[in-house]
Amino acid sequence: MAYSQNDLNEEYRFINRIRFPDGNNVNLAVLQERLQDECDSNGIPVAFRNDTLKTGGLFSKQVEDVLVLYNTAHPTDYLQFLIRITHQGKYAFMDVFKVGYSKNFRNYNKAAGGSTAQKIFNSLTGQNQKLQEEENFYTILTDCMENILS
């Protein structure tokens, strides 16, 4: 699945942009290895897939490689994360955006929007606990990213 410029919406940013002043050796493969090791050591199940991002206008289309990180226990019902590294001068920049959707957040939002049936369903199925576990995953993932970048 190729991603597009629309997936780079600031509203979907997962962490603040990271800049590497001496970024010549910063690339997706090194980042993937370090992040996988950090997530493994913190006990969260992640995997990566290679994908592409299409950017530019009608006459200046560009395609670049990106990584997509996802939870192996919830590959389609948790958010996924598009990781992009760009270079300019000696700098490298890393951006991480949320892509996909979360079934747990969708159910929570339906209940919060006034759906009585959804509130009952959430209560019977332990939806609040599932949502808390998902939010904990994102918190640990954020910490893992910060740990490898500091």
Image: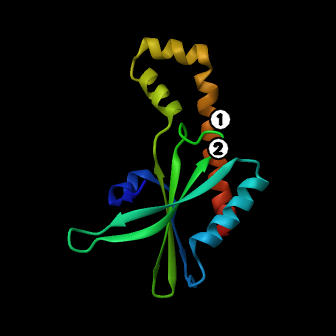
Q: Residue 91 placed where, x, y %? A: 51, 82
- From this view, report whether residue 94 is shown above or below residue 10: below
Left or right, 71 with respect to 110, comes to: right
Residue contact at pointers 2 and 1, CB within 8 angstroms? yes
- From this view, report whether residue 64 is shown above or below residue 75: below
- From this view, report whether residue 110 is shown above or below residue 88: above
Q: Which mark is residue 133?
A: 1
Report how far apart the C-alphas of labels 2 and 1 lie in the structure.
6 Å
Q: Residue furthest left?
A: 58
- Secondary structure of the residue carrying tag 2 is helix
Q: Residue at x 71, y 47 (%)?
A: 44
Left or right, 9 with respect to 136, comes to: left
Q: Residue at x 39, y 18 (%)?
A: 114
Relative depth, front residue between 114 and 47: 47
Q: Residue 144 placed where, x, y %? A: 68, 57
Q: Residue at x 60, y 46 (%)?
A: 138
Q: Dot 1: few (<14), some (14–19), or many (≥20) neighbours within 10 Å?
A: few
Q: Residue at x 29, y 71 (%)?
A: 61
Q: Residue 145 placed where, x, y %? A: 63, 60
Q: Which mark is residue 137?
A: 2
Picture quadrant of residue 23? bottom right
- Secondary structure of the residue carrying tag 1 is helix
Q: Residue 2 placed where, x, y %? A: 40, 57
Which color scheme is applied?
rainbow
Disc tally is 2
